[in-house]
Amino acid sequence: MIVALDAMGGDHGASALVKGAVAAARDFGVQVALVGDPALLEEMLDAEAGKAKKGPSAPLPIEIVPATQVVAMDESPSEALRKKKDSSIQVAFDLVKKGRAHAVVSAGNSGATLATAMFTLGRIKGVRPAIGTLFPTLKEPSLMIDVGANVDCKPVHLLQFGIMGALFAQEVLKRPEPKIGILSIGEEGYKGNQQVKKAYDLLMKSDLNFVGNVEGRDFFKGDVDVVVCDGFVGNICLKLSEGLAEAILKMLKSELEGNLLATMGYGLARKAFKNFRKRVDYAEYGGAPLLGVKGVAIICHGSSGPKAVRNAIRVAGELAQIGLAQKLEEAMARSGRGARESFLKIL
Amino acid sequence: MIVALDAMGGDHGASALVKGAVAAARDFGVQVALVGDPALLEEMLDAEAGKAKKGPSAPLPIEIVPATQVVAMDESPSEALRKKKDSSIQVAFDLVKKGRAHAVVSAGNSGATLATAMFTLGRIKGVRPAIGTLFPTLKEPSLMIDVGANVDCKPVHLLQFGIMGALFAQEVLKRPEPKIGILSIGEEGYKGNQQVKKAYDLLMKSDLNFVGNVEGRDFFKGDVDVVVCDGFVGNICLKLSEGLAEAILKMLKSELEGNLLATMGYGLARKAFKNFRKRVDYAEYGGAPLLGVKGVAIICHGSSGPKAVRNAIRVAGELAQIGLAQKLEEAMARSGRGARESFLKIL
């Protein structure tokens, strides 16, 4: 499996991406196509591969594929798609389209990655592609889908997210009978807005192991494998969680510093914080898969460091290996008829 | 000012409520009407007032107003409204309606409190009442509005929430020129769903000090005084934040216990956690005001203890004192014409 990495995107520049690629190639043997400015990438790769080669390792399976343009982080996705035909994002997806690579990883402009994936790879028939993200919980991580690909959803889209999330949970998270819930404002099925109440009915009639509404309060308990929501709500939840976790750590640290860290074992407390951070670190999960396109694409946080990139490449390779996109296409075709029927009944 | 307290609602029973009432009467001199089962309340009040009287205090300004029915926490609000004409919630609002009290506080069934408030007090003309909640941030607390009264909102309702939130921030939080933001998925005004983008335009054209989109990630920084959102999204944010804060504390404590608390100053660390909890404790803010009805109503968390009830009674008294409901009515009337016009232009 060859993973095409958009080596020019992200907040930390190409260096973090090349480091991640080298780590993935070295640690997991994944083949990586680094897409971007060849001179720059060559130089960085030499420096990194040199370090990596100090051990008894074979040459790393990394190639460089040139792209002359870069999509800026704040550039309009539609404009990038139209005008930058040789951007690192576009070239990466072209590699998959031509069969020269099997998956794309990008930490660049996520709107542009999304648009380019949909346009170049195409959507699975009748499906709204959606972004899933793994959230840490008190138990195993849960998948929230969608976290930003669709800001205005119809109930049937939430059903599709449930079907795609269930397959991801089975195939990737290895949960044989994943529990699917829908994010709402009360446990009872009659609670929610119009969209969620209708989606609840659709999910209830589906073949999914649907467990009903999940409240925000219970989400982090980790009792549900997949939580379905529209992309606007999901994106807000994702960012609110990041912001809150950061704020809590800041507040708590300032309390601890006053009371404890100054007087007693600062090192030990730091270790506890570090372990905690590792536990809730999104980098461990390696980016967010875009489900519903005809191929594999992983969207990483713009601020992804080498570790997150390394893990995203690993996951991308795995998704390509198990043929997740094809399996999704089959699952959607199977459920398509049923979904359309219940959809018509309800709306 | 007399505050009518629904003394039968909440998860902890009447005892926590009576304790809160006694504390409010003693500490702030607020007059309280305890509404509920007279025999039960009399007994509890005697026990509590006895303790309170040990100091050199005058008799507490607390009266008991009988109500023969109680709305269960999971009862249907519309059914409660229809069938329980003598519930503690209904009697409390009747007291305000008759001018015998000036505000209501309830930790009972929040849907029933909401419905009874709207039905008994009435709505301010043309306004969708909304629930505001103070969130702790790294700076001063911010008001999020709506957190659950309206699960399906139109853009103009978000404008109304902004107007009501701004007045609350001025009058209660004492922020002369409150910054108003709208919760969305990116900083730029063109990001968001249809509802939010239209509300953005309405807010931009209003007289409010509107600062644009606020991302979930930035919410806890505390740079904005009032964050507007629809009640479905707001309720999810509220509960997600509660759930996440609890989960983080659990995870962090287990890390600290392994590394630090077991070996070193457990007491000091506990103190830090306690200070932290105080900082993020919703009880400090004393419940969530229902804005947009013709009167003062404060909805408390079902799990409110005496401290939260005490603070809610204090805030309810203050809101009645400054005549917030009347001021809101005036503000809405002033802005009504403008709001309607821009609404028609945009939709």
Image (spheres, coloured by chain):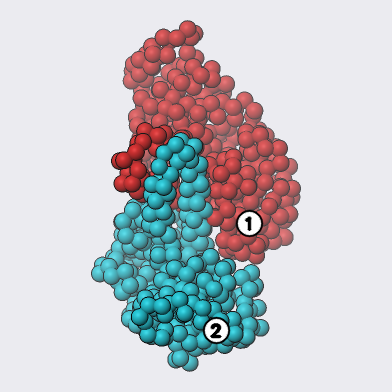
Chain colours: A red, B cyan
Q: Name the residue at 63% across, 73% down.
A: B72
Q: Name the residue at 71% across, 47% down.
A: A208
Residue for badge 1: A213
The image shows a total of numbered marks equal to 2
Chain label for disc 1:
A
Residue B245: % across, % down: 47, 51
Q: Name the residue at 52% across, 53% down.
A: B243
Residue A159: % across, % down: 65, 50
Residue for badge 2: B42
Q: Observer-nearest residue: B118 or A76?
A: B118
Q: Residues within 10 Å of mark 2 (few under 14, many from 20)?
A: some
Q: For the C terminus of chain B, which image quadrant?
A: bottom left
| Residue B271 is at least partly visible in this image | yes
| Residue B214 is at least partly visible in this image | no
Q: Quadrant of residue A217?
A: bottom right
In the picture, the disc for residue B73 is none
Q: Is residue B219 left or right of residue B247?
A: left
Residue type at mark 2: give it.
Glu
Q: Observer-nearest residue: A275 or B160?
A: A275
Q: In the image, is residue A267 above or below residue B187?
A: above
Q: Quadrant of residue A253?
A: top left
Q: Residues within 10 Å of mark 1 (few under 14, many from 20)?
A: many
Q: In the image, is residue A57 above or below residue B74?
A: above
Q: Name the residue at 66% across, 61% down.
A: A189
Q: In the image, is residue B117 above or below residue A137?
A: below
Residue A324: % across, % down: 63, 33
Chain label for disc 2:
B
Q: Quadrant of residue B346?
A: bottom left
Residue type at mark 1: give it.
Asn
Q: Observer-nearest residue: A339 or B290?
A: B290
Q: In the image, is residue A157 above or below residue A75?
A: below
Q: For the N terminus of chain B, which image quadrant?
A: bottom left
